[in-house]
Amino acid sequence: MVATNVQGKESAGVTPALWSSRFVFIMAAVGSAVGLGNIWKFPYITGQNGGGAFVLVYLICIAIIGIPIMMSEVMLGRRGGKSPIGTMGAVAAAEGRSRNWAGVGIMATLAAFLILSFYSVIAGWTMPYIVEAAKGGFAGIAAEDSGAMFGGLLASPGQLLLWHSVFMGLTVLVSAGGVKHGLERAVSWLMPALFVLLLILVGYAMTTGHFGEALVFLFRPDFSSLTAESILVALGHAFFTLSLASGAMMAYGAYLKKDVSIARTSFTVAIMDVCVALLAGLAIFPVVFAHGLQPGEGPGLIFVTLPVAFGQMPGGGFFATLFFVLLLFAAWTSSISMLESLVRFLEEKGVGRVKAAVGGGLAAWLVGITTVLSLNLWSDFAPLAMFERFEGKTLFDIYDYLTANIMMPLGALLTAIFVGWVMKPEHSAAELGGQWHALWHAVVRYVTPIGVLVIFYFNLF
């Protein structure tokens, strides 16, 4: 088998377990891709950029950038059978190239680590909202009171640290269980539960009397409202929503059986990821329209505006609780994948799975404390203010900027170059199969790099 030849005997005695089925891998990959970006960010950026026309451009970008890069990362992961760092070094060596290509894996692992450090803090916001919704705290709440509640949460280092710690603990708990008893068990329960919760919320949205308005908003293109900036936002979100260039898909691909079609599986994951984003829009916009609110409210749409809407609806407390549990599940499945690259690398260095998960999680938790403080006590601390681009940016802003605007696009670009121009076509064909290979190879060689370069350029300049 090709993958076995690439792996050789360099795994430091670590033989990775494999996903028990294609379904489990899809659930894991969808869990990695589906996160706060789908349910929190997608609805409000759609609202800000004109609705249906933006959705159409977003879907096109998924096809020309998202799916080819996802196929590339899963293919490399399965061929290398290691952590992203080990995989890139091993596959490059097998191609007769420099092992310095392992730097792509290092950058992806570091990006995932940094994202996890602040993602855990943001994901922690969902927990006090679950508690507040369950005890009826949103009933009749006014907009200014809802804003004060959210502002009070961000201003409290103690609360943020508590929920950051709980969320990171949940992530480490799953990761420490390994592939079979941790990752598989978690995604096999959490992802179906997430879809059920989302469908219940869509059903609830259908009773508001504004479901048709939401359908028109999401699916009737109005190209007069589409700007060049909207296209760039769609391009960027299509790239980030699939959890690309963070090592997650490469790490998960290392556990994929040889008889599973990477192309069909990647298409399935992308379709399910898009469906979650669209269903989230169908769950949220009818509630927004029913109360005369603006769909482009920005990040506050979820944590400030929706509590007001739920608080004015019959049964709103129950459905608000379901909604924030849904957010928690989505964030949890994503955070597990972010930690996996580092944990797998530590395993290859001889560290036991539990120690690797605890050590990696603890390190991310410690860095996350700087994000906690950036939201309150250190809100005026801008360590790179001497550079114009970073003027006024907190540590949290810097982490977000470096990962989203530099590390991930650069990692995706280098991945596309590696699989399209460095890796021998017959080797990638052996993993992907001849049916899809020619089309994929052409797109990943020419189309995808241009798309990523566009993201890179406009993010930086």
Image (cartoon, helix red, strand yellow):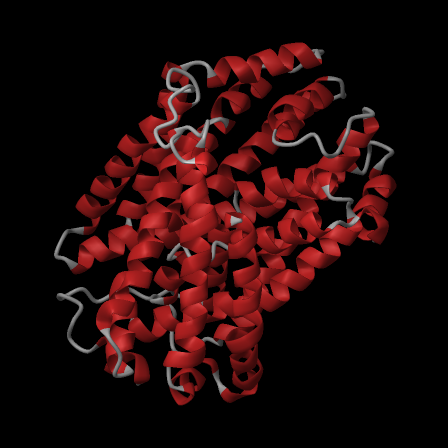
Identity of the residue drawn at 73% across and 43% down: 49
Left or right side of 106 for 385: right
Residue 57 image point, x, y percent: 71, 58
Residue 339 image point, x, y percent: 33, 47
Q: Quadrant of residue 105?
A: bottom left
Count numbered badges in the picture: 0
Check the image and report above or below for 57 versus 164: below
Q: In which quarter of the image is residue 16?
A: bottom left
Left or right side of 57 for 341: left
Identity of the residue drawn at 82% across and 34% down: 207
Report the quarter where the N terminus lies: bottom left
| Residue 82 visible in the snapshot | no
Check the image and report above or below for 318 versus 360: above
Q: Quadrant of residue 289?
A: top right
**Nearest the eye: 390 or 104:** 390
Residue 416 image point, x, y percent: 45, 70
Identity of the residue drawn at 83% across and 53% down: 223
Identity of the residue drawn at 39% across and 56% down: 248
Check the image and report above or below for 446 versus 188: below
**Nearest the eye: 399 or 52:** 399
Left or right side of 237 for 305: right
| Residue 452 visible in the snapshot | yes
Residue 65 image point, x, y percent: 57, 65
